[in-house]
Image (cartoon, rainbow, N blue to C red):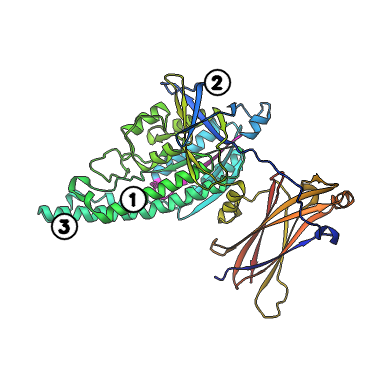
Amino acid sequence: MRMPLVFPALLFAAAAIAQAPPPSGVARVDVKVINVDVSAVDGGGHPVTDLTRDDFEILEDDQPKPITNFAVATRNGPSAPRDDLTVRFRRRVVLLVDNNYIDRNDREAALRAVDTFVDEVFDGSYECAVGMIGQQLDILLPFTTDKAAIHAAIAQVRKARSTTFREDMNRDILSDPFRNNARGALDATVGFESRERTSRNARSINNSMVALVQAARAFATTEGKKLAVLLTGSMDLNTAFGGFGSGEDRELQDMKLNIAKLIDGAIREANAANMTIHVINAATRRSALQHDVQNRSSGLTGGAARLAATRLNSSADTADDSSPFAIANGTGGLYLTSSALKQSFETIDANARHFYLLGYAPGHDDDRQYHHIVVRTKRPGVKLSHRQGYLDLSADERLEQLLRMRVSLLQPSTNVPVTVNVQTPPSPDGKPIVSVLAAMPMARVTFLPNEGRFAGRVHVYLSIFDAKGNNVGFHHQTQDLMLTAAQREKSAADAFRYRLNVRLDRGEFTIAVTLRDDLSNEIGTAVQKLRL
């Protein structure tokens, strides 16, 4: 599809405002701070709640950084006083059900545990959202404290199809009656099975990791502390039958390397969004994908079991290298198994009740590079969990990432009331022209005094999606405003209006316009469907 052409125009009731020069005298000072929230537990897995600033040290890219900000956040009940710290770092939890790696029966057991947790434990002191992962990410429920709405979203998940390797497992690879008894044929058959399973795993994990990236970007601009609970199965890296020499298979090794890159990319995106991912492996032993005869755990025993028992992640000494563990370990989350599903949800809930917020100045601008973070404690016997790095993007770049994704349509920003009116005026050459008029109250634009006048700035984002949800057009325009005192007073009851004319091909489209006030950073989105 041809890239849409966009022709912007600013509209005001008073023409003098539209002709005003840009606010050259406005200076905005941003103090950049990297926030890292840290959970601390003792050897028994119990929260440690009395640490101070002096008990911590932070390193970025192996370089020590002074701690400039320190706070202790404790989640109280919904009726507790909501001070600034509580509101700013309010927990927001999104449940992501990965249908690519979970058996229907195992999924049902896990969802029953979710329903029970919501009824018996969830107290409304934080907000929950529900998403589902198939070939793409679907947000079934935006953030809410409504228990009935959460149960309804879970019911939607139950209706969805799930994918499993279970049917393949019914045929034991080592007892295939169609296989020759010759050693060479055995090795060749096992090698082929390894490649086949690895190829299928690569296709499935691509869907899951792309969805995790979408979730991270979707919630990157959300205020508060973001937690994702990934309900999945045995997405194991170890898809080689190492006992039969298939580890030397170059094709298989390349596929495994690509899988590792996908996982690493998802971890980096989650860290960039400051979103912790707790992983619950809901696969039971009877349905766990057993790829590597040299690694019998498939993420169910060994290091993973110790991890679940001690509620630790990155600080734990474990040899488990399964994909779910890698995701949890890399984002500061917990990795828990199916042995006690309800207890797993309660463990995550308890872990989120108390954390330390550390902040430091990175010493560099938005360089679009990934930086590693290490947090240490000077107190013996205390284990820490935290995100292990971040991608250094500006807030505007993160917002653009979100607005380019279909998922942004599922939970549009509503902090600022924005309206959009889409029309299709006659075109002299017969090619469709779409006229998009966006508006928001002028009272929501923040102005600062500037040499006897008042200066403000509004960002306008236009996103266009086709019928399949693919982004086929994106436009970002910054509009500077300079008003006299009389103009500002007169326009306070009016609206900021911005028109964009777009050329599109024939078809069905969804047009989303987002307006953002530059100084307050408040945003609003309006969406309208269109058929040409």
Q: Is 366 left, or right, of 282 in this rendering?
A: right
Residue 361 numbered tag: none
Q: Earlier in the sequence, mark 3 or mark 2?
A: 2
User: What kind of residue is marked 3?
Assistant: Phe
Q: Quadrant of residue 359?
A: top right
- Asked if disc 1 and disc 3 are in contact, CB closer than 8 Å, the reply is no
For the record, the magenta segment spans 90-104
Q: Is 329 left, or right, of 241 in this rendering?
A: right
- The picture places residue 349, in percent across and down from the top left corner, at 51, 31
Q: Is 98 left, or right, of 190 in this rendering?
A: right
Mark-to-mark CA distance, 1 and 3: 31 Å
Q: Residue at x 33, y 45 (%)?
A: 237
Q: Residue at x 58, y 68 (%)?
A: 3
- The picture places residue 499, in percent across and down from the top left corner, at 73, 63
> Could you tell me which secondary element the residue under label 3 belongs to?
loop
The residue furthest left is 182
The residue wearing badge 3 is 178
The residue wearing badge 2 is 52
Q: Depth check: 280 or 506 in front?
A: 506
The residue wearing badge 1 is 257
> Could you tell me which secondary element the residue under label 2 belongs to?
loop
User: What kind of residue is marked 2?
Assistant: Thr
- Asked if disc 2 and disc 1 are in contact, CB closer than 8 Å, the reply is no
Q: Is residue 411 above or below residue 123?
A: below
